[in-house]
Amino acid sequence: MQVKRTPKTYEVCIIGSGASGGTAAKVLTEGGLSVALLEAGPPLVPERDYKEHVWPYDLPHRGAGVGGRARQGLEDEFLAPNGAWEIEGEPYVSAPGSKFRWFRSRIVGGRTNHWGRIALRMAPVDFKVRSHDGMGDDWPVSYAEVAPYYDKVESYIGVFGTRENIPSAPDGIFLPPPKPRCTETIIKKACDHLNILCIPSRLAILTQPHNGRPACHYCAQCGRGCITASNFSSSQVMIPPAEKTGRLTLITGAMARELVVNKDGKVEAVSYVDTATHEEKRIHARAFIVAASACESARLLLNSKSTLFPDGLANSSGVVGRNLMDTVGSDGGGYFPALEKMPAHNHDGVGGMHMYLPWWKFDRKNEFLRGYHTEFGGGRGMPGVGDYDDLCDDFEGYGSALKRECKKKYGTYIGFAGRGEMIPNENCYCEIDPSAVDQWGIPVLRFHWKWSDNEIKMAKDMQDTYREIVEAAGGVYLTATSPDGPNPYGIADGGVIIHEVGTARMGEHAATSALNQYCQAHDVKNLFVTDGASFVTNADKNPTLTIMALTWRASDYLLDQAKKGNL
Amino acid sequence: MPISRRDILKSLTLTAITGSVLRVIPLEAAEYAHRMVRAAKAAAENQMYTPKFFSAHSYKTLQALCQTIIPSDEEAKGAIEAGAPEFIDLITSENKDYQVALGGGLMWLDNTCIDRYGSVYLDCTPQQQKEILDLIAYRNNAKHDPSLGQGIEFFGFLRKLTADGFFTSEIGIEYLGYIGNTYVKEFPGCPPVPEA
């Protein structure tokens, strides 16, 4: 087949339209540059694609999906479109002895259509961990340097929260938080008693009209996508203003295969598969921003081999694919008899927690390094498939007694999710599988994964803490975990928390890092990798806000370089 | 003339494009669109159901079991009225593991009833039906009689699917007292928490 070339040369080509790609598209087009934005999936039409306000009984599968997918631990039918644990025709491989799961999204906006909207700043110490405890590496950038960009992102997208002056959880620019739900009131009281911090959460959801978007209407369905764009997604908040400039060319159905370099060692084009026609096409640009998600970006770099770059692009250090991190996750939950007495009431709220537990043991020596925050929720939510599995197993029997028991216990459970910092280790990385390709003929990733002791100890601390909180709140802790087995203390498999980062880390030295502090490749000056791949560490803060702040900063730098004629 | 859903969505899109930089739909219009979609779906319902996977006999047995697991009583209607058998048949028709677990489980039940009582489950007396269900509704019974193991496994799975079908129905959701899935201008917070 003949390779088709688009004759036009854009100033910048961005690969990936999620949190990072969308931010870059907005900043660069508003800064005056012409941008081609490639997205592997289709366009998004919220009013057609989102299932907001749909009841389970509006769907023949009741939300369980074809063949009861949701019951097999896969995504439910209500989820915003095209985000999945498995994509047909696009496999990935876990190496023997490793278990890694990879949630991917193929649609404009990427995983910002699905994410939990949790928008936490990294703390000053999070950027300088090695100086603090000797493990891992420091970032080549400080909190003070990133803070102005956190400000810009929060001001633009809208994040609710409260000013608390907690060293492990820096304050931002906040909209007012929503009132607590009953479940949050109960846990807050127990945490106060135990001297555990419990504060209003920080989510990218509007509690007031903001920058032309209406306020949240409190249906608790952010994960389905929001038709009124009252929460943040790249597709609804970053890409529209970029389109408005007239300088954005959004190309959907474009699966990037390889970055093509010229004889001077600069990237001159990206070759991609047009997924509708299966044609090979190219986009030419003066600069390239890779923002396809940490692992997908590493895959693209590793697949871009040439005589100049035999180990893959921007990989003279050998770190591309290495330093892979996810978040330490361990969940637990309890039953709260007091909630049985709550009158029926609207408990929905925003699509996420109204309160959370930031890391509170930052001022003492612990059994493990670094920290974790805790998300929690439960109560009288919309009933869904699988909600009654455990109760059916516990109560057994049948008939009106079972039916009444289910009603009695409805809304009486609260679950906790620990989200902690993993220290990178040499056993966690991704590489190109030597034999497998996807349906486009692009070699796929093979993942290697092993938690270290520090993470297991952290998971144990999560379990101990959640038991303590549940019991202090008058509840019964129901989660049973074991120190042994493949998931000690309930630690989630790698990738399951969907915070994978670190696969093309930034650093001061070209020998030990792929990028400089502006996400610019040490080896290839017109190449930037702005997504989570650039992370040096993976603090206990959900990465999205930091991805956007770093991308904004990199984009400003790129604009400055363009003004100086260095593009 | 009634406005079709397509027209509304089209007008919403136009409003959004002309009205704002961001693709935002006015709240009231979005709410109206949601109501229209629901009304259209409701009108299409209430037709006679033909099972996709189960035989006529198996489906009748399935219905009987669903209604026994979550019966219609003075508090609320039951699993059949809630459409649980249709839901179970649909996902079973798409899942080979479910076909074995449920199809095989129903055959196990009929065979066990023939062994014990001389007829298939549906032809047993109410007392016989209660007797066998009381045996397979509790895991502990397998300790005394290991031959019940398969029946207990089957019934445990069907109990979960029946709960799914019932509690995700309009009847089940109303029975639980879930209030929400709607537009509220301000989140009211928690009503007073009664002392435990």
Image (spheres, rainbow, N blue to C red):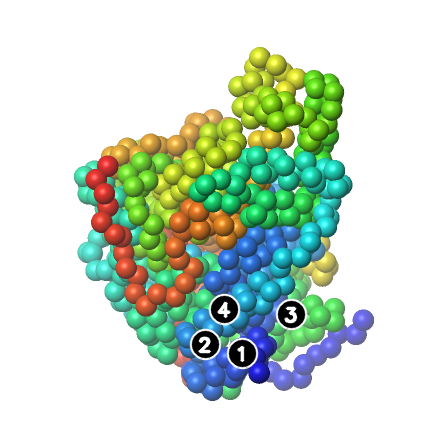
- Residue tagged by mark 3? A253
> How crowded is the residue under tag 3: few (<14 C-alpha within 10 Å), some, or many (20+)?
many
Q: Earlier in the sequence, mark 1 or mark 2?
A: 1
> In the visual, does A119 lie left or right of A249?
left
Q: Picture coordinates of residue B194 (x, y %)?
A: 23, 43
Question: Do dots 2 and 4 share one subunit?
Answer: yes
- Marks 2, 3: nearer the viewer: 2
Q: In the depicted view, which residue is nearer to us: B145 or A237?
A: B145
Q: Amino acid at mark 3?
A: Gly
Residue A87 visible, this orientation: yes
Q: Picture coordinates of residue A216 (x, y %)?
A: 36, 67
- Residue tagged by mark 4? B35
Identify the residue shown where x is 60% and y is 65%. Answer: B43
- Residue tagged by mark 1? B8
Q: Amino acid at mark 1?
A: Ile
Q: Pointers 3 and 4 in contact (CB under 8 A)?
A: no
Q: In the depicted view, which residue is nearer to us: A40 or B29?
A: B29
Chain of the residue on which disc 2 is drawn: B
Q: Earlier in the sequence, mark 1 or mark 4?
A: 1
C-alpha span from label 1 to label 2: 8 Å
Give above or below for A185 relative to A171. Answer: above
- Residue tagged by mark 2? B29
Q: Amino acid at mark 2?
A: Ala
Question: Do dots 1 and 2 share one subunit?
Answer: yes
Q: Picture coordinates of residue B160 (x, y %)?
A: 55, 37
Q: Say which element carries label 3.
A: loop
Q: Earlier in the sequence, mark 2 or mark 4?
A: 2
C-alpha span from label 2 to label 3: 31 Å
Chain of the residue on which disc 4 is drawn: B
> In the visual, does A440 lie left or right of A522?
right
